[in-house]
Image (cartoon, rainbow, N blue to C red):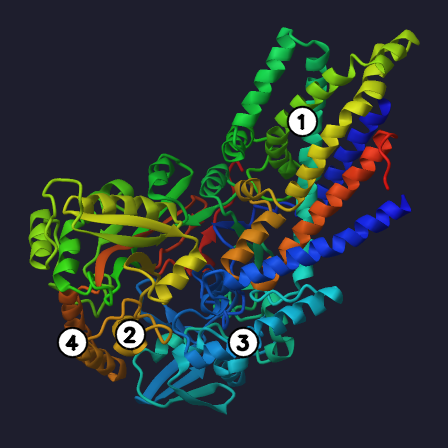
Amino acid sequence: MRNKSLSFLVLILACSFLSGCGEKRSTKGDAIVVGIGTNPTQLDPRLSQDAISSKVQRFIFSRLISQDHEGGIVLELAEKWERPTPLVHRFELRRGVRFHNGETLTSSDVKYTFESIIDPSLASPKAAGLKELARIETPTPHSVVFHLKEPSASFAESLMVGILPESARKAGSRFAQKPVGTGPFEFVEFTPDQRIALKAFAGHFAGKPAYENLIFRILPEETIRVLELESGGVDFLQNSFSPDILPRFVKNKRLKIRKRLGTNFSYIGFNLTDPILSKLKVRRAIAHAIDRRPIVRFIHKGLVQEADSLLPPDHWAHQKGLPRYSHRPALAMKLLDEAGFPDPDGPGPRPRFTLVYKTSQNELGRRIATVFGHQLARVGIEMKIRSYEWGTFFGDIRNGNFQLYSLTWVGISDPDIYRYIFHSRFTPPAGLNRGRYKNAHVDALLEEAHQAADTGVRARAYGEAQRILGRELPYINLWHSVNVAVFDRRISGYRVYPDADFISLARATLSPAAGR
Amino acid sequence: MRKFLLRRILLLIPVLWGVTTLVFIVTQVLPGDPVDLMLGETARPAQREQLRKTLGLDRPLGVQYADYMGGLLRGDLGTSLHQKRAVSDIIFERTYASAELTLASMAVALLISLPLGIAAARRQGTALDLGAGLLAVAGASMPVFWLGPLLIIVFSIGLGWFPVSGREGVLSLILPAVTLGAALSPILMRMARSSLLEVLPQDYISTARAKGITERRVLWLHALKNACLPLITILSLQLGALLSGAIITETVFAWPGVGRLVIQAIASRDYPLVQGCVLFIAAVYVTANFLADIAYAWLDPRVRLT
């Protein structure tokens, strides 16, 4: 008996000892704790392409230019930006900007950052966006000139990358383990699956943030994120909860809620090489068979806005008066009859044809797919839902191994995205034209818009392209998401960005904890 | 004993080789391409080829396999495609967290199951036995993804005794350990009860009682020692399972263990990390079984390790 008890005691003490060596809870008094669902894949801004990495990096790295809360381009490390010709971008850098390691920002750092991105040995996913870049000159320590091979209206967006110190070259791949930038917060530590700790950078060119610590806690389970927010374990969540939860937050007096229409766009994609879906009447029938309203109301709880284009309605290039496919099941059935797919047994159980709809394992996506399947069944189309783990799903979509699928484009800002998605030259593996859409007129319009410097010319070309795409329906436009931030009342000054960036937290203020 | 140890260690080699080879083949036929996941869809074909070359994925499979096995022989599990760090370092970091959770949850499971199992065996057919049985059924019926949040709501949100999630100090270990321990307890309890019921009527127990040994000593020293053998089997299997990752519990409590690492590695098609993790899991299972064999011999002298 004594021996057993002793063994248990030793076991418990061992556990306590081991656990005692783990992380200690951070001081909450002067910190904002943000709950996120996944680890950032990369803290080197040249190498990441996921949204979470980009959001965390924004606090560590500043960019030459960036977007403000209205989606407009603003100067960040640059204090002047000129385009003397369509092939030249000239930047004057702010003076006296310092990196977290004490080095001063010069044009060499900017040159190094962008040249390393296009260096094939780095294998940066951002290299494709800089393919028009011919060379970079640094005439003075504070001026940097980008020379392009051909005009590119979207090149500015490719410049929105965090600037590294040239000394990062020596660190090599180890740089991402201790990243150094000029952003408002310095990197402290990253413990995968636990947290990323940042501390306010006193030498930031726009002044030190108003609070000392910014912590990102990685909480994969939605229920736990919600409970952590309610219990004060985290102070801030944005979009990382399902719409059903929002009423619960509304009742909580300790929390503030801020919303704004975002730039994430959800759609149903067609495989246009499929013998059934290559018929326009079938695509139009599906568009009329789908009723987005009940999904918006009952599943998304109003936190999305129906879309008629990739671009949100307040975007400068959004075309007014685009075709909207209202819910008209009778018309859908008529179009299917005309397309050569009559209903074999009227109201009987046999379908006109069967389609496979692929989606990821996201629970919300699967619920929505179930509703689509039910709506299509009413017009005589059987829809089989296939839900896959992300890598398999993504591989199938890229390889054209699908009939229907649904996905979301995240953070659309420059309309040049149309070229990558609908230009016939950008069929995978060369681009994002997953549905294999081909239209020479649309190709020409998108090329024209890509090369034009004048916003009016671009808007006209994109407008015409949107009208054609609205008629030809390579996509069914579903909705734009509304970004929702829920945070502790102690936080003031936070603005929700269209692309759901967290960066306005850098300028937020934190009132003293009350009763914490 | 030495012969036994040597034989088991030698047996380890073909087992681990088989597992390694199987995992290498499976990762190659998995749908999804790590290059796609790393570069995204806008990358140019030349860039893809370059990355494929950098990662060594352009070489013939036989060469990749030989290279991987050569690395293993040198103790090198390779480098993570995404994290660009040694796979062994990444797994080692997670092992620590998994070991904490495993030891704590086993302690909880034993603390619940042994006293209840013994009491149920000693009072077979009484209300206590029935109650213990019902408790076991209830415990086995509660999935961890339900029990975990329930414990959080009661003890973290309601009473404020423990942190909701994360691995930050001793208190954060309690709820995940109780969740996992509660899931493990029913089978241990039922096993302890049935083993004791088999052992208690045996002659050597009657003899011990006749010698005047106290009932408590008869039970805990004489009876339980022999009744422990099936428990050791279950514990060794569970030790392997828990050390290699209690994925749901780790996810619910945001616990940075090996289970979540494996899932992330598979999702991102990080082949070296997947291979390293599976090799680690296989090694854990083999070691746990090996320890169980030794424990058998220690508990029951009739078992000979040859």
Q: Is residue A187 visible?
A: no
Q: Earlier in the sequence, mark 1 or mark 3?
A: 3
In the picture, measured across the screen, residue B111 lies left or right of residue B45, that is right
Tell me, for residue A416, which label it has, or none: 2
Seen in the picture, residue B46 relative to A488 is either above or below; the reply is below
Seen in the picture, residue A209 relative to A293 is either above or below; the reply is below
Q: Residues within 10 Å of mark 1 (few under 14, many from 20)?
A: many
Q: Amino acid at mark 2?
A: Asp
Whole-angstrom CA distance, mark 3 to mark 4, is 45 Å
The reply to whether the C-beta atoms of the residues labelled 4 and 1 are less than 8 Å apart is no
Dots 2 and 3 on the same chain: no
Q: Amino acid at mark 3?
A: Asp
The residue that disc 4 covers is A460
In the picture, measured across the screen, residue A348 lies left or right of residue A366, that is left
Circle 3 chain: B
The residue that disc 1 covers is B188
Whole-angstrom CA distance, mark 2 to mark 1, is 62 Å
In the picture, measured across the screen, residue A490 lies left or right of residue B303, that is left
Q: Nearer the viewer, mark 3 or mark 4?
A: 3
Where does residue A309 sit, x and y in percent of width and height?
21, 63
Where does residue A267 sit, x and y in percent of width and height?
26, 58
Quadrant assignment for the N terminus of chain A: top right
Seen in the picture, residue A186 relative to A103 is either above or below; the reply is above
The residue that disc 3 covers is B58
Residue at 36% from the left image edge and 67% from the top image edge: A399
